[in-house]
């Protein structure tokens, strides 16, 4: 099980975000899965480090009203379940889909969802371009460390309902990339609402949540076929 210090940190995060103790208990199980499962697709597996680098960083999105109010969440390119699993634990009434194309990562996600008892989580083992289960009906799309922002925007836009939002975790701000993203967003029916600087844990630097809202229908030509967004990015 995680160390006493990691469990203490989880309890502090639960208090900070006004979460039930059961959330901290489930996240403790999640940290243990990251530590002990050889399929865990992350290099940060030590619970004392992962509680901040993974859990606190994911829960930072709870400061956004749209995330707190979401009935449906989709975590694009979920990997180790980040940020989807911590947010699904924090928001048990939100149906959360973890979309991941890698079979081994999907195996880890399925085992971890069972292990943590998260009944509001389902795994979609497919490329996001081909996932249409709730196309055009998602409240909030989540993306953390999956590629250039213009690519993330193209993945997310077709999934969102009108008024739905994308929350994209980013590090240091890059003016050229942000300008390209604004052009891509306009083409996809999205508008930038805010870039929020966050400090999810002591000493965190250059952490930002980029929030885009779907304000117009996404053109029918999106999503493009698998791989096209990366090969020929918008913007």
Image (spheres, rainbow, N blue to C red):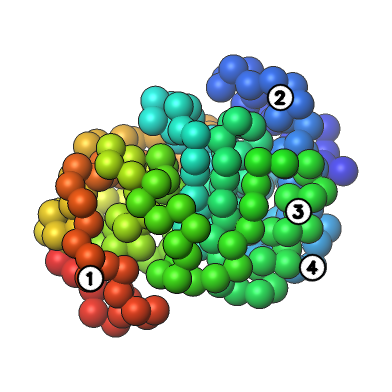
Q: Nearer the viewer, residue 119 or 185?
A: 119
Q: Which residue is mark 1?
A: 221
Q: Residue at x 69, y 73 (%)?
A: 104
Q: Residue at x 19, y 42 (%)?
A: 215
Residue 112 has which mark?
Answer: 3
Q: Quadrant of residue 226?
A: bottom left
**Is 141 on the left or on the right of 183, as rendered?**
right
Earlier in the chain: of badge 1 and badge 3, it is: 3
Q: Which residue is mark 4?
A: 38
Earlier in the chain: of badge 2 and badge 3, it is: 2
Measured as percent of width and height from the top left, residue 146 is found at 44, 63
Placement of 140 over or under 80, stated as above or below: above
Between the C-alphas of marks 4 and 2, the distance is: 26 Å
Q: Which quadrant is home to the N terminus?
A: top right
SS type, badge 4? loop
Please identify, in this view, whether the residue under mark 3 or under mark 4 is nearer the observer.
3
Q: Quadrant of residue 188?
A: bottom left
Earlier in the chain: of badge 1 and badge 4, it is: 4
Please report contact status of discs 1 and 3: CB closer than 8 Å, yes or no: no
Earlier in the chain: of badge 3 and badge 4, it is: 4
Measured as percent of width and height from the top left, residue 114 is found at 79, 50
Q: Is residue 149 visible?
A: no
């Amino acid at each position: 099980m995680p160390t006493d210090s990691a469990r203490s940190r989880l309890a502090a995060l639960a208090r900070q975000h006004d979460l039930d103790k059961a959330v901290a208990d489930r996240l403790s199980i999640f940290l243990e899965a990251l530590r002990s499962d050889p399929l865990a697709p992350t290099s940060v597996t030590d619970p004392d480090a992962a509680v901040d680098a993974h859990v606190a960083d994911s829960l930072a999105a709870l400061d956004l009203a749209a995330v707190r109010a979401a009935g449906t969440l989709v975590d694009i390119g979920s990997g180790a379940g980040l940020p989807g699993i911590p947010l699904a634990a924090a928001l048990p009434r939100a149906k959360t889909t973890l979309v991941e194309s890698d079979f081994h990562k999907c195996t880890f996600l399925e085992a971890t969802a069972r292990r943590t008892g998260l009944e509001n989580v389902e795994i979609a083992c497919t490329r996001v371009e081909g996932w249409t289960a709730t196309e055009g009906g998602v409240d909030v799309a989540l993306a953390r460390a999956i590629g250039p922002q213009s690519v993330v925007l193209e993945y997310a836009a077709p999934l969102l309902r009108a008024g739905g939002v994308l929350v994209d975790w980013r590090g240091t701000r890059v003016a050229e990339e942000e300008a390209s993203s604004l052009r891509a967003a306009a083409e996809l029916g999205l508008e930038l609402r805010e870039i929020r600087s966050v400090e999810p844990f002591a000493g965190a630097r250059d952490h930002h949540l980029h929030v885009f809202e779907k304000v117009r229908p996404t053109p029918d030509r999106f999503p493009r076929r698998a791989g096209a967004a990366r090969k020929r990015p918008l913007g």
